[in-house]
Image (cartoon, rainbow, N blue to C red):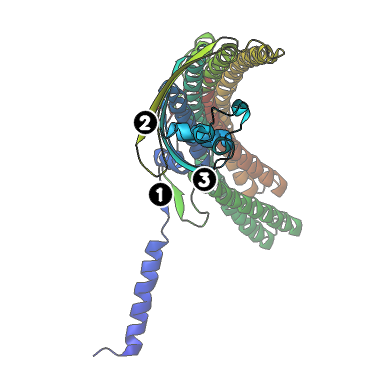
Amino acid sequence: MIEKQALRPLVLGVMFAMLGQAAQAETLSFQQCVERALSQNPDIEVSQAQINQAQAAVRQAEANHMPKVNLSMTGTYTNDALNAFGLKLSQRQATFGDFGAGEFNPADPNVLKIAPRDLNHPGGTGNINTRIEVLVPVYNGGMVESYVRQARAYTRAAQAGDAHARQMLIKNVLMAYQGVHTARAYVKVGEQAQAASEEYVRITERLLQQGMAVKSDVLTAKVHLDDVKLQLARARNAEAAALDQLHLLLGMPLEAPLDVGPELAPLPLQGGLPELQQKAKDGHPALQAMRHQLEGVTANVDVARAGLLPQFNVMLRQDWNDQALGFESSSYTVAGVLSWNAFDAGGTSAAVDRAQAARIETAAKLRQAEEGIQFQVREALRKSREADEAVVARELAAEQADEAQRLVKKRYENGLATMVELLAAQTQLDKAQADLVAARYEQVVQRAELKRAVGLLSVEQL
């Protein structure tokens, strides 16, 4: 039988193993990161809510084409002479007695001057009115149609705005995702530099013991090692910061374990400047959103102008009036209402002018945005090509710095170079490798930015 003391290490081992599995970081590829961000990021939730609002506005505007049915029930009790008599008429209960027939005396010469008491001073009269009323819009100067066009235009604008927000989010996810890999590349460079610096300290200490170096060389090598350790710590902090940024973009808690999949290598966007600028002008989602907004503002001008035209509506009503709840006294009403705002001191005309000014403002902003997109494409293409050239140059510089460091190291070991020269060569190699890491990151970002500027950024395009 196994004793409790022997079981305890086994149980603890199983528990730690389970905890280790639970805390294992979830590894997501770039596509998985984008999918999670698009489903959980608050910015996308905002744009989706705006689309839902615009679609609801379309349904609300279209509902104005349809008749409206109102149901009501009104209870009334009054001793007002006019209303009390009117309620009796509505209930079909008026009699000659209500006109004071019992007080009429033909023999009295002043009979026509007698005020009927029951007619002028009725008792309390109760009534319950049950009503069905149908309002049918017939003509409103095109106001309803303009509201529908406006709502549909704003829906398309919201959908284009959502596409633009998605592209911006994809770029931000890419920068954070690739930022993790870039920071890890810096960590690798730092670790290599630390290993080289530690080796230099050992070489220098050995040469000092052999009388081939001085104490200051050892101190210089140790100072350089401390500096390299500091740079390595900064690189590790940058890696943690990039992962934190990715957590935020994905809508994940910062404490949730997360790791990234393979490094991203987007292909360059093919085409010359005129072709890319035309693509951006035709299909950039931000421009599409503004064009649809212009459609909505133009429709608003027609809404304002409809206030200058006559309107005609039909009303159909069925009433039941009774002293109690019932359907005894029935009546119907059919009415056609023609209205025309003949004079409002210029208020409607001012509304038209205001709507036209808003349309002019939106059109000007659209032209400005189109010019801005053209500039962004030109600038993004220039920077993308520059980043490609920088990678080639940095790769060559790293190769040369590596060879130079190797030669200086051999010379130093043979007593033909100083510690200062050796550390300078190592520093140059570290810088060349770090510059190459930065250049590759910039290449990825600029290629993505060019696609975003043209309006083509998507996971498939990357």
Q: Quickly name the residue at label 1.
A: 27
Extreme residue toward the left, this view: 1
Question: Are the residues at dot 1 and dot 3 in contact (C-beta closer than 8 Å)?
Answer: no
User: Which element is circle 2 on?
Assistant: strand
Q: CA distance from mark 3 to mark 2?
A: 71 Å
Extreme residue toward the front, this view: 107
Looking at the image, residue 295 sits to the left or right of residue 413; the answer is left
Q: Amino acid at mark 3?
A: Leu
Q: Where's residue 96, x and y in %?
A: 46, 31
Question: Are the residues at dot 2 and dot 1 in contact (C-beta closer than 8 Å)?
Answer: no
Badge number at residue 246:
3
Q: Where's residue 439, x and y in %?
A: 57, 32
- Which residue lies at the image location 67% right of the left edge and 63% below the top edge? 209
User: Which element is circle 1 on?
Assistant: strand
Q: Quickly name the residue at label 2.
A: 330
Q: Amino acid at mark 2?
A: Ser
